[in-house]
Image: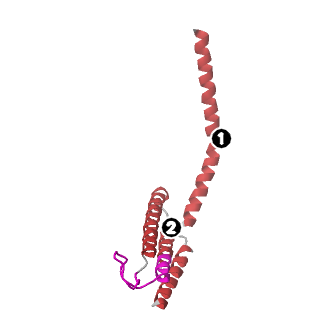
Amino acid sequence: MNMIFSLGVAVLFGAGCYLLLKRDLIRLIVGMALIGNAANLFIMSAALKRGAAPVLPLPADGAFADPIVQSMTLTAIVISFSVSTLMLALVYRVYGAHAAVDLDELSHAEEEDSARDDLDAPDVAANYLNEQFVDANEQAMERANR
């Protein structure tokens, strides 16, 4: 039975690592989920202990399943689900802004935005300083006219 769990962990982990190497954000999220599931299966199989349910009164022979491993695995499942949900929401927003989920396309779009912002930055600063200068002159003229 442990060999089956070990093979399952290896397949999940291998598939997750393969997907992490892809250049698509959705595949990255699925790869992270697979690696998380592999880790959960590893934790459960490493501490697999057969016995009665750990409910009081405990069995006289003392053979009962370990509830700590199950609770830790359940906590890990909830955390990985919430992280996956957050990442899917971020990918949705990125897709809405750039209409792409490929990392190469996104980095190219980010470089274009950065270059455009660098070109616009001196104009924005000059306009701001010009507005401040005009406002200061108008205030001085108002004070002089009073």
Q: Earlier in the sequence, mark 2 or mark 1?
A: 2
Which kind of residue does numbered mark 2 sit on? Answer: Leu
Residue 48 among those drawn in magenta: yes
Q: Residue at x 46, y 70 (%)?
A: 76
Position of residue 84 in the picture relative to residue 56 (left or right): right
Which is nearer the eye, 144 or 34?
A: 34
Query: In x, y percent, where is residue 57?
Result: 34, 76
In the picture of the structure, the residue carrying the numbered disc 1 is 122
Name the residue type under label 1. Answer: Pro
Q: Residue furthest front?
A: 60
Q: How many marks?
A: 2
From the top left corner, tell me how far across and down residue 64 is, in percent.
40, 81
Instruction: Determine the residue positioned at 61% across, 52% down.
Output: 114
Residue 111, magenta (yes or no):
no
Residue 51 horizontal side relative to residue 35, left or right? left
Residue identifier under label 2: 25
> Which circle marks residue 72 in the picture?
none
x, y percentage for residue 132?
61, 28
Region in magenta: 38-64
Residue 142 % position (x, y): 58, 14
Provide the secondary structure element on which disc 1 rests.
helix
7 vs 104, nearest the viewer: 7
Q: Residues within 10 Å of mark 1 (few under 14, many from 20)?
A: few
Q: Name the quarter where the C terminus is drawn.
A: top right
Give the Cα separation between the discs numbered 2 and 1. Answer: 34 Å
**Local SS, label 2:** helix
The one of 85 and 90 positioned closer to us in this rendering:
85
Judge whether 32 appears above or below 111 on screen. Answer: below
* Residue 70: quarter of image: bottom left
Q: Main secondary structure of the magenta part?
A: loop
Given residues 69 and 102, the one toward you in this image is 69
Q: Residue furthest top?
A: 146
